Image (cartoon, rainbow, N blue to C red):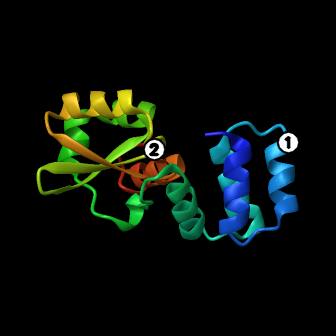
Amino acid sequence: MSNSDLKDYLARNIDVDIKILDELFAGKIINLFDIALILIEKHGVDKEKLGRAWGDYLGFAYVDPNKSIVNKEYIEKIGISFIEINKVLPLYKLGKAVTFCASNPTNSSVMEHTQRKLGELVSIVFCFPFDIKMYLKNNNFIK
C-alpha cells in the first residue's frame, strides 16, 4: 500500500480537507496510525468512519474491539506479549474460525503464526493498534 494511494482514498471517503491530509502525509510523521490519531483527535474525524474507510481500502472489515465480543480465553491462550507485539486481538469464534482484529491484516505471516499458535482457523478484520491497546488497558490486561 502506498501512502499516496491511501491519502487519496481517505480524501475521497472521509470528511477532511485534502490540505490537511497533504500536510500530514508530507510531514515528518511516518507512522500511518499516528496520522489516524491526529485526524481523530485534532481534526474531529469520526474514528468509526475513518476505520471503515481504511479497512475498505485494505480489503478488510473494520471492527473496534471495544465495541465487540472479545474472547478472554483466547487472549490467555496466545498471551499478552504476542498480542502487543503483533497488534492482534482475538474477538469471537464464528463457525470454525476465530475472528481476530489486526492492525496489519495483510501480514499473512503473523496470521499464519497466530493460527498455528491457537490451533484453530483464523479469520481477520482490521482495527487500529490504539483500539487494541485501549481494550487491553480498559480490561486490566496491561497498565
> Which image quarter holds the C terminus?
top left
Q: Secondary structure at mark 1?
A: loop
Q: Quadrant of the N terminus?
A: top right
Q: Nearer the viewer, mark 1 or mark 2?
A: 1
The kind of residue tagged 1 is Gly
Between residues 10 and 84, which one lies in front from this camera angle? 10
Specify few, some or many for label 1: CA neighbours under 10 Å numbering under 14, 14-19, or 20 or more: few
Along the line of sight, the residue nearer the viewer: 99 or 106: 106
Circles 1 and 2: CB distance less than 8 Å?
no
Q: Secondary structure at mark 2?
A: loop
Q: Position of residue 141 (x, y in %)?
A: 35, 45
Give the residue pinned by disc 1. Answer: 27
Visible residue check, residue 41: no
Q: Is residue 51 above or below residue 6?
A: below
At which x and y percent is residue 65? 39, 59
Residue shown at the point (18%, 41%) measured from the top left: 121
Residue 64 location, quadrant: bottom left
- Which residue appears at 41% of the width and 61% of the height? 63
Q: Which residue is mark 2?
A: 143
- Give the residue drawn at x 52%, y 51%: 128
* Amino acid type of the residue tagged 2 in the rendering: Lys
